[in-house]
Amino acid sequence: MDWIVSILGSSRLSVLINGSPTGYFSSSIGLRQRGPLFPLLFGVVEDFLSRLLSRMVESDQLLPISSPRVFFALTHLLHVDDVSVFCRIIVKNLKSVMLAFRIYGSISGQLVNWSKSSIIFESLISLTRISSLQSLVGIQIGRFPFSYLGVPLFWDKPRKAILMPIADKILSKFAKWKGKSLSLAGLATLIRSMITGSFVCSFMVYKWSTFLTKMVTKKIINFLWTGSCEERKLVHVAWNRCCKPYDFCGLGLKDLALLNGSLLRKLTWKLLTSNNFSFTFLHDRLPTDDLLFRSGFRLASRCSVCGASLESVDHLFLKCPLAADLWESIFEGKSADFRVALSLVCYSVYDENSLGIGCMRNCVDDLLILHWFGLYGRSSKATVIRSVVWLPPAPRWIKVNTDGVTLGWPDVGGCGGVFRTCRSFVKACFAVPLGQVFTFEAELLAASLAINYAWNLGWHRIWLESDSSYIV
């Protein structure tokens, strides 16, 4: 912060009068809140809070929430001047969070407005514990659902009662006086601006129900042709034609269901492709200090591992002592180089391909990767779907369907069967657990037990059906 203040305070400004600079003066008032440098400086200051919370998590001063084994536990989110902290509800965590905000406020000068802050507990915590924890921090209790950045947050899946206020708020802007005073082109422009501006935030996060999208679409159609959301009129132009672009004789409107689905797919694509290490590595876009140097920034740089050289892709993955020891163990004492490493990878891929091992997934990504290595794609076989129909036996006959299954080869298994009459009525059934057997043994035991049970019950006209061709 002292560096930033000294840089801004030591700079001198000049004003162009008639195309030539006239006089120099220093900046003494400071920065405006909406100035071009304000977001950058605010991000620099907030980065200190983010690192402080992360350091507390690393030192076990702040215990994060539980998460699945393959996912990273979220600890905090920062958006402009809003901060969300996620942690376990214990006294130690609450004290650590309050301490972090006090340290941040004392250093940066930005204090937390506790009157606008809230703490949300999970539903399983008792009211007695909630009141004691609230008295410890002195923050009001928040409850679901609530709105954050214009998007409602709630438990469970999105329901009509939660998303309906958003639709009502947007439809309320289609006032009747606006519709009566605008032409058809003006109404279409107003609808386009409202749909693309108001629905996008929630459409990018939640899947709206078909009922809500149809209801809002009907209101929009009424407003387009009558100027009011409640009045109806016989329309001779289909809505899907109105949603076509201008080049295809449409009005350029958006179908809400298609817009919702496309925005959700876009979000899914971003989640799948963002921070892709292999893509950024191969395209030399890793956020290293070397990349900043080439972009025109000058800063002091040292490797965070060894602290002896400039931070670059070559150093981090090849020249650093830790990486060099790793490559030396792989290449058996030979010097590591990017071309050597790439040749080793290509050789391994060619070797696997020549042996005919494995198949690619039936997707474009795998095909592009194989084309990059100059290999043909061996796609996996498509799943064959067959129709299986149960045929009833002849009168006075009993049909039994048997099956056997195991968890492995061999492993614990079981077998069973169902006896039915010509009218599909169940006469009897059986299920027997088995020990360590093969799948063929389980199928054979199921058939033999079915025949044995039928003989003991006096059923001599038996039709045995099994999905194993060896047994039949």
Image (cartoon, rainbow, N blue to C red):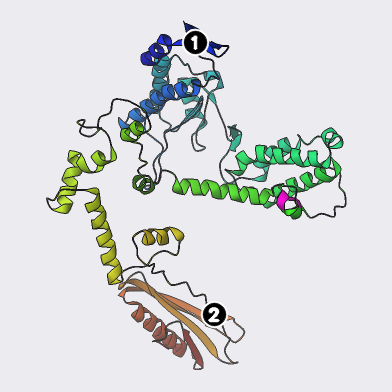
Quarter of the figure that contains the N terminus: top left
Q: In x, y percent, where is residue 73?
A: 40, 39
Q: Is residue 219 above or below residue 429?
A: above
Q: Is residue 244 visible?
A: no
Image-based side of 38 in relation to 352, left or right: right
In the rendered image, residue 3 lying in the magenta stretch gets the answer no
Mark 1 Cα shell of 10 Å, populated few (<14), some (14-19), many (≥20): few
Q: Is residue 287 above or below residue 33?
A: below
Q: Is residue 42 above or below residue 386?
A: above
Q: In x, y percent, where is residue 425?
A: 59, 81
Image-based side of 189 in relation to 6, left or right: right
- Which residue lies under the disc numbered 1? 14
Report which quarter residue 286 is drawn in. Answer: top left
- The stretch of residues the image draws in magenta is 242-247
Q: In x, y percent, where is residue 74?
A: 42, 37
Q: Nearer the viewer, residue 66 or 46?
A: 46
Q: Secondary structure at mark 1?
A: strand
Please give the name of the residue rendered at 54% of the width and 48% of the height, measured from the top-left corner.
Answer: 266
Mark 2 Cα shell of 10 Å, populated few (<14), some (14-19), many (≥20): few
- Which residue lies under the disc numbered 2? 388
Mark positioned earlier in the residue sequence (1 or 2): 1
Q: Nearer the viewer, residue 264 or 61?
A: 264
Mark 1 → mark 2, Cα distance in angstroms: 85 Å
Q: Secondary structure at mark 2?
A: loop
Looking at the rendered structure, the kind of residue marked 1 is: Ser
Looking at the rendered structure, the kind of residue marked 2 is: Val
